[in-house]
Image (cartoon, coloured by chain):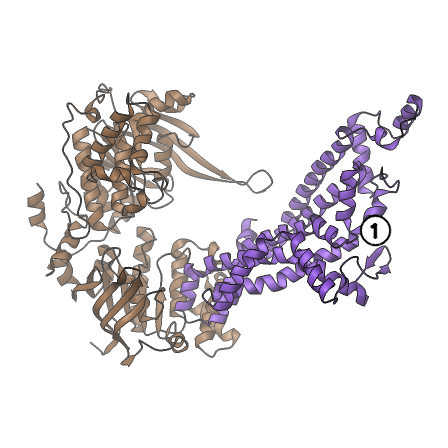
Chain colours: A purple, B brown
Amino acid sequence: MFKFVSMRLLQSIVVMLVVGLIAFALFRFVGDPINNMVGQDTTLEEREALTESLGLNDPFIVQYGRFVSNAVQGDFGMSYRLRQPVSGLIAERFPATLELSLVSAVLALVLGVPMGIYTALKPKSLFSRSFMTISLMGVSLPTFLIGILLILFFGVTLRWLPTFGRGEVVELGWWSTGFLTASGLKSIILPAITLAVFQMTLIVRLVRAEMLEVLRTDYIKFAHARGLSPRLINFSIALRNTLVPVITIIGLQVGSIIAFAIITESVFQWPGMGLLFIQAVSEVDIPVMAAYLLLIAFVFVVINLIVDILYFVVDPRLRVQN
Amino acid sequence: MSKELLDIKDLVVEFPSRHGDVTAAKDVNLSVSAGEILGVVGESGAGKSTIGNAVVGLLERPGRVGGGEVFLEGEQIIGKSQAEMRKIRGKRVGMIFQDPLTSLNPLETIASQLMGTIQTHLDLSDAEARERAIDLLDQVGIPDPSARVDHYPHQFSGGMRQRVVIALALCAEPDVILADEPTTALDVSIQAQILDLLKKLVREKGVGMIIITHDMGVIAEVADRVAVMYRGVVVETGPTAKILGNPDHPYSRSLISAVPRPDVRLHRFPVVESIEAAGECKELDLNTHWLGKARDFGKSDGPLLKVDNLEMIFKSGGMFGGGKSEVRAVDNVSFDIRDGECFGIVGESGSGKSTIARLVTSIYKVAGGSINFAGTDLTKIKKRRELNVHRRQMQMIFQDPFSSVNSRMKVRDIIAEPIRFHKLTSSDTETRQIVDDLLDHVGLGAKAAVKFPHEFSGGQRQRISIARALATRPRFLICDEPTSALDVSIQAQILNLLKDLQEELGLTMMFISHDLPVIRQMCDRVGVMSKGKMVEIADTEELFKAPQHEYSKHLISLMPSYSGLMDRDAGQAEAS
């Protein structure tokens, strides 16, 4: 177990270094950073001085080393556009994105997994059939449309829920949370649902397909032939076997919720990283883009690590190799 | 005999479909008493398994019992609710399935699976259930049961897993056990052990057992009485000696006559026509036909294939995996195959038989040794194109007729592919003509060319494979378990076809099988493989009469004897 995890950690570090290289390459190859920082009337000497002071004349490998060591300490340089430290900008917005992602991931899981099990166990029931039909819409409707429809219905027509922003937040050290105020909680409902709909339908369909597959296996048939109760067969034997492949996909999905909440954040004016990233792209704000890239890579690496460890816990076949 | 434990009366099982009901079992009457083993034998699709499933109420949808009664100790159990059936399944009727590798939940320990079943049926505490679980493992012959009970299924070998499956079926001391092909997925030596175990349990515990199988050897070994099934109908029931020795029904007769004889070598297999009649094999004049041309390979001196000190090692692990391990799949194997002979390779699974076939055809790279084919060392050839010249002369027929033909290609293209690849014809019209002739020749008929593989049965697909193998005009044919996935009657047809082709075309064959009777019927000489080593090479008849090596002796002693099998001299006379 220890060996396995440390091996995975080592691999993760390699992955992060490679992503770091790509992020760093952005500085070198996407636009000229000096041009982005100075105005039209800067003299050549001033430009030279700036280049020198930013260390852009050093060899590639030295610059990369400096970039990595700074990044490890949480220093991603200054935003070209906002002239503020990137780490500060991200720290300001990361909690918003993470809270939104977590709520919608939990929502998708809590509704999706039981629904998947139900539709697999009772594939012929009216509820299952109508749900599968509706879920097709969930998969095919674009996220922004769902968001706009929700806003229209609950925000504009019924006026039950706020349609933009995070509401009031409470500062806990550097972390700002919307979970502790009524307006914060109300504000998160609509964007979280918007973000969760697609993930949920995906999880339902995945769990259902896997479960149907498992229910056809010999060991399930043999369990029935031994007279075990359906509850034991369905939830203890079948569900656990279903989860093995489902864990991977769910892990990746949680990662992509965090990474690609951009559209939902724009629709609901959610002050998260997605908004920051879009603005950075349109302004070629490379330090922000690089930091965002690294952060998302880090999120995926961590999730993958957790998925691998979960695999280890769920599937005994992986445990015996040593 | 004591009273009947399980009595099946006029059972009808139907599968409704769009084209009306399909009757899978019709008016089936079977019964089994305490301490008795009833064998139900028949070919695939005969409805054997359906009966077992119907008895315990586990018919797969949309199947249903269309009529009849099943009495378990005098009590009618057809039509009981699922909740009531659950108290019967496992507690009073135990089941054993075919494949031990898939019958156990891979994520649970043996202890947890056994205890779950025990506590479902018996009112025992955890500690008592565990004790009983260990006791059961001991009864089915698993060594060191108190430690093994906490292991997971993947930590057991196939034979041991089947013992665990049997232990699970025995959890609540059922009165009747239904064993559906309990040894089909196992090697002969393991099969013998499992059958012994089943016999012992039946005698000791006085349960009634129904063994469903396609294998006459299993029936001969364990059954007290036999029921022969054919297309959903029990055509004949009687004591084993009677059915095997002197069956009344013509189907039973032909079925038994198709079983490869372990004792005497016949020229041809008697053929059963009642299941799947083979098409007429059209004769071709090989002197003028394309297939007969370019066969003049020139007499090579010495053997056609000469294998010396062949080595193959499989490595696993490496990179980030850590612990590397090596398996010596083929360990210093030498043999040669003479021009025109059929050389058999026999051994249990994992002995390296198929690996040799793959090395000879250069699918795998050798780790050491040489393979001389018609005077050229194939291991020394570096260029793919040069290798293909030799590959054209050697073709392979695989075990699984379902996965060895591309299901998205038409039969014509499947067979034409090697011709096109090796550019053996000058025009597409010629290729088509050859494909049609080949299909006629293997008994499928030229009409088969425009169909897709899924329209054919296993035996017919194997004919497609044979036609494809012949399409390059090979001189050397490697058959890797060509009939082990087929029913006996189909097996007889395919083996006859191979024999005919070998004679006609003067083919040299390497015939790989785990089935000793088949080897005896097909091969001139045999090599016996065990754990990657070839322990003995001998003329077939000598090997069967006087095996030299310990392992060969062991293997041959396990061969089903079919004592008192039907006198088949009539069939022999007809054949020769």
Q: Could you tell me the amino acid type at mark 1?
A: Glu
Q: Residues within 10 Å of mark 1 (few under 14, many from 20)?
A: some
- Label 1 SS: helix
Q: Is residue B527 above or below residue A110?
A: above
Residue at the farthest front position: A157
Q: Residue at x 45, y 73 (%)?
A: B118
Please state which of residues A193 and B357 is positioned toward the viewer in this rendering: A193
Residue A292 location, quadrant: top right
Residue B138 location, quadrant: bottom left
Q: Is residue A14 visible?
A: yes
Image quarter in which the N terminus of chain B is found:
bottom left
Q: Is residue B306 visible?
A: no
Mark 1, residue position: A92
Q: Residue at x 83, y 45 (%)?
A: A87
Position of B567 with respect to B118 (left or right) is left
Position of A117 with respect to B306 (left or right) is right
Q: Residue at x 17, y 66 (%)?
A: B237
Please state which of residues A183 and B527 is positioned toward the viewer in this rendering: A183
Residue A59 location in percent, x, y? 80, 25
Please state which of residues A272 and B213 is positioned toward the viewer in this rendering: A272
Residue B417 location in percent, x, y? 33, 31
Number of labels in the image equals 1
Q: Is residue B94 above or below residue B305?
A: below
Residue B20 location in percent, x, y? 27, 62
Residue B301 location in percent, x, y? 24, 19
Residue A106 location, quadrant: bottom right
Image quarter in which the C terminus of chain B is found:
top left
Position of A294 with respect to A146 (left or right) is right
Disc 1: which chain? A
Q: Is residue B362 above or below residue B149?
A: above
